[in-house]
Amino acid sequence: MSEAATPAALETRGLCKNFGALTVANSIDFRLARGARHALIGPNGAGKTSFVNLVTGVLHPNDGRILLDGADVTPLSQAQRVKRGIVRTFQITTLFRGLSVLENVTLAVSERLGSGGDIHRPAGSRRHIIDEAYGLLERLGLHDEALRPVKELAYGRQRLVEIAVALGLSPKVLLLDEPAAGVPSSESGTIVDTIERLPAEIALLIIEHDMDLVFRLARRITVLVAGQILVEGAPPEIAADARVRQVYLGERAHA
Amino acid sequence: MAAVAEHIVASAAETFARRHRFRWYEALPWLVALAAYFAFPDYLALGSQIIATVLFALSVDLVLGYAGIITLGQAAFFGTGAYAAGLLAAHGMGAPVIGLFVAAAVAALVGLISGIVVLRTHGLTQLMMTLMVAVMLHEAANKANTVTGGADGLQGMEVSPVFGVFHFDLYGNTAYFYCLVVLFICWFLMRRIVHSPFGRSLTGIRETEARMHAIGSPVFRRRLVAYTISAAMAGVSGALVAQTTQFVATDALGFERSGNVLIMLLLGGIGRLYGAFIGVPLYMIAQDRFAAIDPVYWYFWIGLLLVLMVMFARGGVLGIIDRVGALLRRRR
């Protein structure tokens, strides 16, 4: 493993962010390897979603740098980072609820190909975009619901559309913010299967509360507590770590 | 099996790809407009005003219904266009079509500049900002009464025949068709815009702005473009009214105009492209009829109509049609 020689898919160096007295990121040094299946866990308020917001450019850090494939993307806007391949999904489903499933994905594909601002020809005449979006829906088993408005779908299906929209952007780094949040356990299996089948070249960072899901998907785990990395390692190491048990699992026990 | 699957693929994507095709009912507004010309020859002046106001409502629909920008100041652009066309005609440049282009350009410029400021804000602040732009222009027009004539109106507009051929006659025949043709062209362009990827991205911004950012869309720029186009359309509408009535006063920039057009759009249905074609005639004809029947209390009847619409017909007339359509389909 010559991890240090090739640049990581995503790296943060000394990432700091505070809102007044509240520190949500305290000098975070983090590496996401190419093709990683990496989970970020931590108790509520640990700064997991803030970390996603910093990496994707929703928030701007007070200090530190964010590197994609070794290139500094810290000054870039959210939209520019998406174009470079940093893509996220949302903990709370954030879709175009009144629009059809196919349209949700079409909008993403259209933006990726740079024709999202095109005013001349109708969207419907761009068959390559529609066909690509439809192909994605087929891969995720959503094609039967292609023309239904997202808001009419069961929540578990909406979580899949979250992933489909992200895939429409051809991500290099995909941050999945609690992909199974709010989904009944009977339906979460489909979501885990979908994540397992994602292309190997996408570096995945999964932010998750559900330990079963984390241990099933992740080959590496980082534990975040109070805006700082507590420990990082392979799943068995994390499961055995006394500090993690105390901070994270302990908190869960009386939650 | 494979053949069946392929058939389903074709149909879902096909249906989606066909959304922008013309449908039979899209011809209705134009047929009605032509029928109205022959049926009500004494009401052509009102007809022209309705047609020009439909265009104004369309411009509001683009920003409010599609881009989700809440505006209470659309009269800023209507008035700008009206004054641009009016001042041209009062200074010996009365060619109406040139007036329209100049009005569109000036209004677009005002839209672009004010949009850069207004669109950086959100929600109630944005609403107040749009209102403020209109109020400022209204005051400016008032102060510059040597140029604009203030509340008394601009004097001495002389509008030439359209293309040097069609004189604006006393009965309003030319004005009616002039307005109708301009509305048709603008409607056609607007229809192209809302069905284009740009238009769909506006709908995306209205639905969920956060996700548009997350799929890499330059949200601010998209909104600014929409705002500018909408301002140009409102400007053309103002120019039409100025040219066909040969008159502009400061009320062209007034709050009442911005407010009324919102009510008309609500009546018809917002974000639907055809809401303007239903709401505006409904409101303006009702206003005309109520004023004739009950000259003192006509505003009361308008108010009653609105209360009933809001209580029983959310989504306006088009909303009602949707629900009836859904009921009929379920019956079948």
Image (spheres, helix red, strand yellow):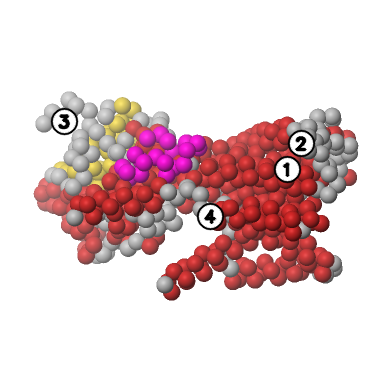
Query: Disc 1 designates what residue?
Result: B178
Q: Amino acid at mark 3?
A: Glu
Position in image of residue B88 (x %, y %): 80, 32
The residue lying at 66 percent from left, 69 percent from top is: B307
Q: Spot the residue most to the front.
A: B38
* Helix, strand or loop under label 2: loop
Quarter of the image that includes the N terminus of chain B: bottom left
Labels 3 and 1 positioned on one and the same chain: no
Residue type pointed to by label 1 = Tyr
C-alpha span from label 3 to label 4: 63 Å
Magenta span of residues: A113-133
Residue B260 visible in the displayed image: no
What chain letter is assigned to the residue under label 3?
Answer: A
User: Where B88 sits versus B65, above or below?
Assistant: above
Neighbour tally class for label 4: few under 14, some 14-19, many 20 plus, Cα within 10 Å: few
Answer few, some or many: residues within 10 Å of disc 1's Cα (few below 14, many 20 plus, some between 14 and 19).
many
Neighbor class of circle 2 (other Cα within 10 Å; few <14, some 14-19, many 20+) is some
The chain letter under disc 4 is B
* Dot 1: element: helix
Location of residue B133 (image quadrant): top right
Tell me which label, 2 or 4, sits earlier in the chain: 4
